[in-house]
Image: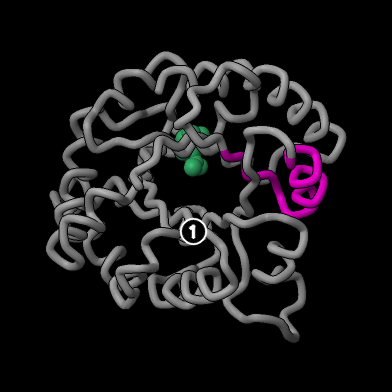
Amino acid sequence: MRQKIVAGNWKMNKNLDEAKKLIKQLKKEIKGNVNEDTRVIIAPSFVNLHYAAKKTKKSNIEVAAQNMHQSKSGAFTGEVSADMLTNIGVNIVILGHSERREYFAETDELLAKKVDTALGQGLEVIFCFGELLEDRKSGNHFKIVENQIKKALFHLEKSNYANIVLAYEPVWAIGTGETATPEQAQEIHAFVRELFAKEYGNEVADAISILYGGSVKPANAKEIFSKPDVDGGLIGGAALKAEDFKAIIKSI
Ligand code: PEP
């Protein structure tokens, strides 16, 4: 079923002391302040995941990892497997974030493997996609987004989509303070939903949640979330302050 979701990507921010403080604040701020039908997810760094999962277990906050390796286990120094995540109570993983694509050379082909491994291990995937500024300027953004989705996801079965959330994150809007207009977000979200309708039918297309990410703040969240094909947000900078994150959640 299509869900309302607000997810906070903490990126490489917050040491354990800071994470403890933020989680405590979030639990307090969010308790009783969130509509029952809205899912709230936080994605701290790997080292803070175990703590976060344990501390949020009885709350309405869910915990996601920001990445994972495509192999089940093995000699991959510095990497983290899907099994390591589920074993500590983390059942969601963000894959395909533009920073992973840009700084760690993650390709659509690699992401297809990561998606398979994650789903095989029982993880839910928040799959990110989005165009660069030059793609948008040249009018190629629809094609870029279509390719990213087709290459990383369209080998999946219909049933897999019960465990996939999409996040449209135009790269030019991430951490830049520049946000896609609600109309630009809606245009791509509707386009993506149509791609899913063509490939998998209306049932899958109508049920999949598509989040928007890119400089969402308390001041602009409501307008973006009001669009019919925007089912919530993936939030970076504004997820690091409990008050701002709460305000964004309340905008949905
Ligand atoms: C993100 O990195 O997923 C993101 C949306 O960041 P920000 O909200 O800071 O633009």
Q: Depth check: 101 or 200 in front?
A: 200
Q: Is residue 13 left or right of residue 163?
A: right
Which of the 4 image quadrants contains residue 196?
bottom left
Residue at the far bottom in the pictured view: 75
* Residue that carries the numbered disc 1 in the rendered image: 125
Relative height, residue 56 to residue 93 (above, below): above
Residue in view at x 55 percent, y 26 percent? 238
Magenta segment boundaries in residue numbering? 41-57
Q: Is residue 103 left or right of residue 135?
A: right
Relative height, residue 217 to residue 176 (above, below): above
Callout 1 amino acid: Val
Q: Is residue 238 left or right of residue 14?
A: left
Residue in view at x 63 percent, y 33 percent? 60
Q: Quadrant of the C terminus?
A: top left
Q: Depth check: 181 or 21 in front?
A: 21
Residue in view at x 17 percent, y 67 percent? 199
**Residue 123, percent across and down?**
56, 63
**Color theme of the render:** one colour
Q: Depth check: 126 or 107 in front?
A: 126
- Secondary structure mostly seen in the magenta stretch: helix
Disc 1 residue: CB within 8 Å of ligand 1: no
**Residue 186, percent across and down?**
21, 36
Mark 1 nearby-residue class (10 Å; few <14, some 14–19, many ≥20): many
- Can residue 50 be found in the magenta stretch? yes
- Can residue 51 be found in the magenta stretch? yes
